[in-house]
Amino acid sequence: MMNWKIKNYASLSPDELYRILQLRNEVFVVEQNCIYQDADGKDFKAFHLFAQQQDEIIAYARIFKSGDYFDKASIGRVVVSPNYRGLKLGKQLMQKAIDFILNEIKENSIEISAQTYLDKFYKDLGFVPYGDTYLEDGIPHIRMIFNRFE
């Protein structure tokens, strides 16, 4: 049984935090072969959205209010466990993050730094690319914006 949760940093249990960091490292550091500082100090300000199945975190994203990371509200560290890909969890995860920003945080614009190979995925959710591609931790990215009223 899959259970979706959203918590601020202080509300995360030690086990939840460990499993979130474990998944982020499994994918972003090991699978993508990208050496970078994942524990970047921004988790303290973030909302942590995740799907849990038994004790395993199977999908995760962190959400920021405007000004806490970018000028606009933002979503980052979007990840689905390799064992659960192909089930459209990424789309569910992003839609829940967007809905949380629009309905709970009450912000109308969302900015992301998207890996360029996921361009179509984010466009299908309503994000529009802005600017040129750039390297972030050695991986091509593009800035994308979602506006509720566009």
Image: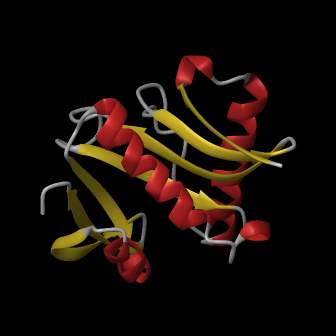
Report whether 103 appears left or right of 34.
left
Horizontal placement of 70 versus 75: left or right? left
Q: Nearer the viewer, residue 125 or 11?
A: 125
Q: In this rendering, is residue 106 above or below 110?
A: above
Residue at position x 42%, y 77% from top?
A: 121
**Which residue is at the front of the view, 66 or 89?**
89
Q: Position of residue 33 (x, y in %)?
A: 61, 71
Can residue 116 be seen at all in this image of the molecule?
A: no
Q: State whether residue 8 appears in this view.
A: yes
Q: Quadrant of residue 88?
A: bottom right
Left or right position of 120 against 89: left
x 40%, y 40%: residue: 100
- The x and y percentages for residue 4 are 65, 42
Report the quarter where the C terminus lies: bottom left
Q: Position of residue 40 (x, y in %)?
A: 47, 39
How many marks on residues?
0
Q: What residue sits 42% from the left and 73% below the top?
A: 139
